[in-house]
Amino acid sequence: MQTETRHGWVWGYNLEHLDLIRRFVQAPLREGIPWHDHGRKMTVVARLPAWMQQAKNRDEVLRAIARIHASLLRG
């Protein structure tokens, strides 16, 4: 499950993974790790490419995820 954008590929392992990415990209406020927690905690969404995490690319990423969903419904 993947589609290409002008910045790179948007892909997901399954629908749950795509939904997690969609919810992260849509979120208006993304909280970081608390200042007192010094351990590295790399979540799935923290590992997304920087271009996917930028608010200016939000619409493009969401359109790409919608295209993937639409292709699954057609297929």
Image (cartoon, grey):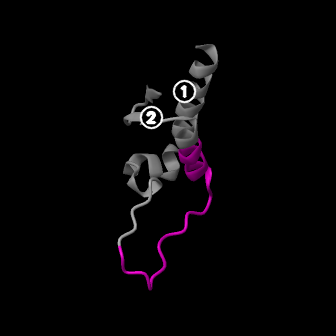
Q: Which residue has dot 2 on it?
A: 11
Q: Residue 59 or 31: which is nearer the viewer? A: 31
Q: Residues within 10 Å of mark 1 (few under 14, many from 20)?
A: some
Report the quarter where the C terminus lies. Answer: top right
Where 33 sits versus 6, above or below? below
Could you tell me which secondary element the residue under label 2 belongs to?
strand
Q: Position of residue 14 (x, y in %)?
A: 52, 35
Q: Is residue 2 magenta?
A: no
Q: Is residue 27 magenta?
A: yes
Residues in magenta, as a range: 19-39
Identify the residue at image location x=44%, y=53%.
44
Q: Which residue has dot 1 on it?
A: 68
Where 46 sits versus 62, above or below? below
Callout 2, which amino acid? Trp
Q: Position of residue 22 (x, y in %)?
A: 58, 44
The answer to whether the residue labelled 1 contacts the one labelled 2, judged by CB atoms less than 8 Å apart, is yes
Secondary structure, magenta segment, majority class? loop
Task: Please count the marks in the image.
Answer: 2
Q: Residues within 10 Å of mark 2 (few under 14, many from 20)?
A: some
Q: Residue 47 or 60: which is nearer the viewer? A: 47
Could you tell me which secondary element the residue under label 1 belongs to?
helix
6 relative to 14 in the view: left or right: left
Distance between the alpha carbons at the discs numbered 1 and 2: 8 Å
Q: Position of residue 30 (x, y in %)?
A: 55, 63
In which quadrant of the rendered view does residue 36 lie? bottom left
In which quadrant of the rendered view does residue 65 lie? top right
**Sequence order check, earlier mark of 1 and 2:** 2
Callout 1, which amino acid? Ile
